[in-house]
Image: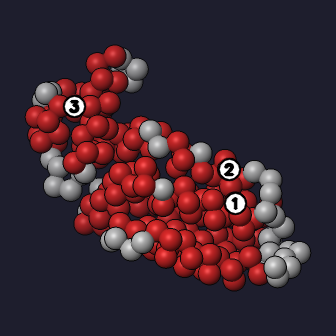
Amino acid sequence: MDGTPERQRLLGLVVDLILRDGVIDLSLSAIARAIGSNNRMLLYYFGSKQELIGEAALVAFDRFPRLRDMFDRLRDAGDLEERLIAAWDDLADPESRPYVRLFFQRFGIAMRDPDEWGDFIERVGREWVEEVDAVLRAEGFDGGDARAAATQIIALFRGLQFLLLSGVPADQLRDAYRLGIRPVLERAPGFSRR
C-alpha cells in the first residue's frame, strides 16, 4: 500500500499544501478538501493526521537539497569552522525558508499536544545533536565534550533560525553564529587562533 500511485499522488499534494499554507490549525478535513480527497482515503493511506503530516514533512525536506545534504557536507574533510559556517548558510538560505517555517509550525503544534507528537519531539531533541556529535568526535573531541558542544551548536541553529523567521537580517545572524561557535572551536583538539 505504501508505494501505490494514488498514495504517492496524495502525499505529493499534501507536501505542496503544507509548504504553501503551513500546518497551523490544519485539520484532516481541511487537508482532504484542499487536495480534492476525503478523510476516509487519507486515513486509509496514512493512518492518522499526525502520520500524514510527519511523512509529508519528510518528503518536503527532500525538496530542499541544501538542507537534505547539510550533514553530509559537514562530515566532509576540511576546516571545521568553515564547515560549520557552511551548515548555517544552508539553514539560512532563502530557498530553505519554507521548510524552516514548516519545522517551527510543527514544533509549535507538538508543544501544544506533546502526548500525540512525542516521537517528533524526541527526534527534534536528538537527531541533529547526534549528527553534530559524530562530526565533533571525528575531529577529536572526547565523548562528553562532543555531546555538549553539539548541543550548543544545535541550540544556536534553532535560536538563530527563529530570529531569521522573525526578520533579523541574515548577515547579522551569520556574524552571531560565528561568534557563538567560537567557544566550541576553541575546545577543539589542536585548535590554533587565527
Please give the name of the residue rendered at 35% of the width and 51% of the height, measured from the top-left corner: 98
Would you identify the image quadrant in which residue 131 lies? bottom right
Determine the CA span between mark 1 and mark 2. 7 Å
In this rendering, which labeled residue sits more in front, label 3 or label 1? 1
Q: Circle 2: is it few (<14), some (14-19), or many (20+) Cα within 10 Å?
A: some
Total marks in image: 3
- 152 to 109, vertically: above or below: below
Q: Nearer the viewer, residue 17 or 122?
A: 17
Q: How is the image coloured?
A: secondary structure
The answer to the question of whether label 3 and label 2 lie on touching residues, with beta carbons closer than 8 A, is: no
Determine the CA span between mark 3 and mark 1. 41 Å
- 176 to 30, vertically: above or below: below
Write down the residue under mark 1: 83
Secondary structure type for disc 3: helix
Q: Tell me if 5 is positioned left or right of 193 in this view.
A: left
- 182 to 35, vertically: above or below: below
Q: Nearer the viewer, residue 191 or 137?
A: 191
- 154 to 55, vertically: above or below: below
